Image (spheres, rainbow, N blue to C red):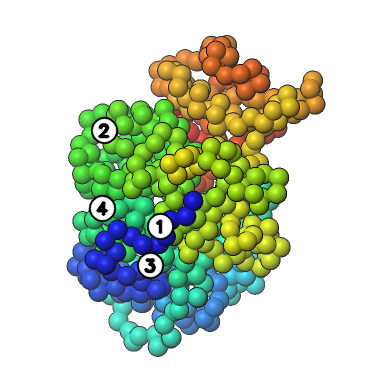
Amino acid sequence: MKHDFSLPGADQQEAPVATLSTLFDHAVAAAPDKVALRRLDAVLTYRELGRAVEALARRLARLVEPGDVVALLLPNSLEFPIAYFAALKALAIPALLNPQYPAAQLAPLLREATARAVICAPAMRDMVTGLAGDLGIPSVVCPGDDVMVPELVAEAGAALGLRAATPSDSAALLFSGGTTGLPKIVEHTHGRLATGVHCIEHAWPMRGQGEVFLPIAPFTHIYGFATGVLVPLSVRGEIVIPERFQPELVVELLVRHRVTFFGGGPPAIYAGLLAARNLGSADLSALRMCPAGGAPFPVELMERWRHATGLEIYEGYGMSEMAPISAATAQSGVRPGSVGKPIPGSDVQVVDLETGLRVLPPGEKGELRVRGPHMMTGYRNRPEETAQTIRDGFIYTGDIGHVDGDGFVFITDRKKDVVFVSGFNVFPREVEELIHTHRSVAMAGVVGVPDARTGGERLVAFVVPRTGETVDPTEISRYCAGRLVSYKCPSEVRVVEQLPITAAHKLDHVALRRAARGEQELSQRERGLKG
């Protein structure tokens, strides 16, 4: 299903900017005295942000050439947008890397990205300096150590004198996947990211300079980057950056700063807030937009959030390769289990799993393929993998789903997560959704493991009890047996204190599969989602 890129009331709107550099400059010029960034007690106005970016850009221009890659190894912080837009001003290409990665994971990524400079947090200086020496990276810069933000704001200097960025210039390198093998580098241009920003502003309608954003997802992830940095600056909003994701702290910030747009994202974030002790008494009257994405969202969890807060969760569907939204619910209406309709400019189709060429009618499940003006240019330095993913002008997503008769898109599962039980394809999400409806369950994850008895696979369910509740595995088995056909029922139910999640707060099915096979323990020390 295709939606043309013409927005309601488009003649009253500003035309989408051509580059992210222009987006930034317009924001600084339009709202110089408005608060742009806030973290702990530190506050930067748009004017101060603009000065800091110009100052750091002058320093970077002495270290790199136009077109060089500058790796950003920064947590969500004031320094991240300063470093990102400074790299763009210097006509470099920012590569967004997860600062939580250990050296062994970072080294091949920095090598693959061919970074010529790294901007990192002071806590990472020693590790990054060592890596840079090993990899031949000439420059390491640590904002907050080498350069304090107030110094950048106060610094005076001449304009760089470089040419303006063009829509076809590369503006970001992001890393797709990472749970198996070396992540692929997704390359996006200024023009496509700027279009992606405009798409998000339509998918989750904005009200302009009155918006106050509280992002949770890492800025190095496409969702956190787009909804936590680019969109807020585009609408001249205020970005409140939490020191960390601690549910009670986040609820406190939502109330104190009258947040209007909560960038929650994956289900793990909303489940965490629902367990916060101060949520029930929180004044969330300013909050109006709660987007979700990054992982399939259980209907039952959505209903719990609505009951607790009176707010809808607006799902969206996207990926790093689509910068990032292709479908959303805020404009089309919420339909349980659906990620909404394609946003303007996006073409979403369901094709058969065998050939990937036959477009399936409404209601039939197959692989989703998408296209639009905000899709990636390709995987950097990987022409064969680019050709496998982009075919006939579409990105083949690897997601299984269907479109109903009204054009609503439903995501069933990842193609690689489908489990083959007794000759039947089983979609783990269907089983997870059912287990979530049990009154004692906070979260659930279902995976397939080899079944020596049948030569196929069997299902293993991991269940986290709600706070104060206990869960009997036998009761969960009976609950499933009374509501599912036999081959969809887990052969084993394990009750755990938490589920493993990735750095992007998604349920880590790879870790669950390892645990199900006995290859690793789900220990209390493991970073995960508790009830």
Dot 2 or dot 1, earlier in sequence: 2
Percent x, y of residue 239:
30, 56
Of 48 and 265, nearer the camera is 265
* Picture mark count: 4
Residue occupied by mark 1? 344
Q: Compared to 292, does 481 lie above or below?
A: above
Alpha-carbon span between mark 3 and mark 4: 19 Å
Residue occupied by mark 2? 310
Q: Secondary structure at mark 3?
A: helix
Q: Mark number for residue 206? A: none
Dot 4 or dot 1, earlier in sequence: 4
**Of the residues shown, which amino acid type is indicated by label 1?**
Pro
Numbered disc in front, either 2 or 1: 1
Residue occupied by mark 4? 212
Residue occupied by mark 3? 82
Q: Secondary structure at mark 2?
A: loop
Left or right of residue 137, residue 506 in this image: left
Dot 4 or dot 2, earlier in sequence: 4
Numbered disc in front, either 3 or 2: 2
**Of the residues shown, which amino acid type is indicated by label 3?**
Ile
Graded by Cα atoms within 10 Å as few (under 14), some (14 to 19) or many (20 or more), the crowding at tag 2 reads: few
Alpha-carbon span between mark 4 and mark 2: 19 Å
Alpha-carbon span between mark 1 and mark 3: 31 Å
Dot 1 or dot 3, earlier in sequence: 3
Alpha-carbon span between mark 2 and mark 1: 28 Å
